[in-house]
Amino acid sequence: MSIKPYKTVTEQKNILLSRGLTILDETFFEDYISRNNYFNVINGNEDLLLVSQRTGNKFYDTANFDDFVRLHKYDKKLSSDLTAILHNFETKLKSSISRNFCKRYCRTPQHTMQYTNKANYVDINTVFGTRYTLYYDQYGKIVDNFNDFVFFKSGFLNSLIKYNDFIDENIFSIDSTSYTPPTGCNSYTIYSGRKHAVVPIWVAIETLDFGALQRCCHYLTSDVINDVMSDFNLSPTDRELFLNSLDVIRELRNKCAHFSLINRFCTSLNVKILPSLINKLGLNPMEPSRRVYVQALNRRVLKNPAKLNLFDTLKVLGMYEDLSSLKKPLKNLIYQNNKHFKKNTYDLNERMLGRMGNTDYKEWKKLFS
C-alpha cells in the first residue's frame, strides 16, 4: 500500500463529497474533524456506510456525515464504559491477590515483605519448563523470566518509594532496632540506616501494570491462586481457564487505553485461546486451530485457535463483571440508526453488530442483562 499524502480538512471534505456523502453542515464537519482523529471518524467506520464493502469501490448512497458522527460518539462512549468496567475488575483482582497472599505469608508485621520472597511463589520454569501450557505461544517469556519479576528485583523497594509519591516513607517505615528484614526478602534502609522501609503488598500491588499483575497470577502458589479464583466464583480446576481469560481481558484493556476503535476490536493472533475457555462460554475464534512447525521442538504441533471478536471478548469479561451499563448506549444507537439512517441497499445496524461479532441484537441484550 502506498503512503497517502497529507490532505487538509477541506480536501478531505471534497473527497467525501465526490464519493456521494451528504454533509449537511460543512462548518460542523470541519470543526468535528479538526477536533477528532480522521481515521477514527471516517476511515474506521466507512466500511459500515459505503454502498459496497469491497476494497476500492468507495461510493456512498444515503449516508451522511451525521451517521459517521453517531457511530464515532458511540464508540467513544463504549470505550469509556469499558474502561470503567475493566478498572473495576483490575481493582478487584489486585485486592484479591493481596488479601489472599497476606493470609498465607504476611500475617505479621515482621513478615510484611514476604511478597518479595521468591520462595513464596512457584518458579514454573523449574517445575514445568517447556511443558507449561501455551509455552510456545504467549506464556514462554512468563515461564523463562521468573527471576526478573518486579517484586524480586534487588532495587524494587527503593524504586517503589522513589517513583511513587503516594508511598510516604515516614508512614511505611520502622526503626532498624525493632525490625530485621527476613531472609530472601527485599530491603531498603532510609534515614542513614536508622529505619527500614516496609511497604505492604496491598500498597505495592497498586503500582503494577496489568501485565505484571497477570504474571503474578502465574507464579502464585496453588493455595493462593485457588483462593483468588474462588473470589471470582471459579474452582481450582479452572486455573488455566482463568489465566487465559486474563490474556483476553488484557488485550481489550490495552485497546481501550490507546483510544482505538473498540467496535473493530479483536484479540491478536499471538493470544491463543484454550479449549476450556472456548467450551465454557461457547466462543467462536476467527482463527482455527492449525498445525505449525516449531523449530525448538523440530516438529509440527497443533496450535490453539485465536482472534476473538468483541462479542466473544465481552463474554469473557462478563464472567467477572456486570456489563449492564453497556446495554443502554447500544440500545440508543440502534434506535438512532433506525430513526435517522436512510436504509436503501443495506441495514446499518446489522453491519455494525456484525462487525462487533454478532448480528443478533437479542444476543447483545442477553449479554448485557
Image (spheres, rainbow, N blue to C red):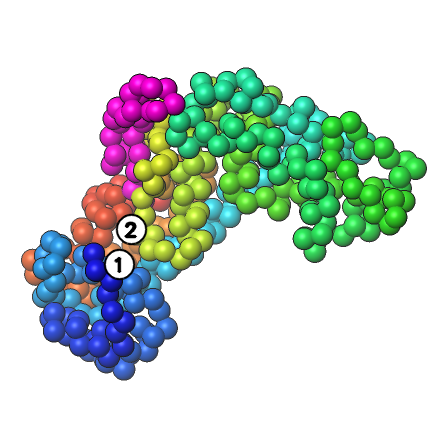
The amino acid on which the numbered mark 1 sits, given as a three-letter code, is Gly
Residue located 59% across and 23% down the image: 122
Most frequent secondary structure within the magenta stretch: loop
Tell me where residue 41 sits by quadrant.
bottom left
In this picture, which residue range is highlighted in magenta? 282-311
The answer to whether residue 70 is left or right of residue 111 is left
Q: Quick one: SS at disc 2?
A: helix
Residue 157 lies in the magenta-colored region? no
Are there few (<14), some (14-19), or many (20+) residues within 10 Å of tag 1?
A: some
Badge number at residue 21 = none
Residue where numbered disc 1 is placed? 44
The answer to whether residue 270 is left or right of residue 179 is left
Residue 311 visible at all: no
The answer to whether residue 152 is left or right of residue 222 is right
Check whether the beta carbons of the residues at disc 2 and disc 1 lie within 8 A of each other.
yes
Residue located 88% across and 48% down the image: 192
Indicate whether 80 appears above or below 272. Answer: below
Q: Quadrant of the N terminus?
A: bottom left
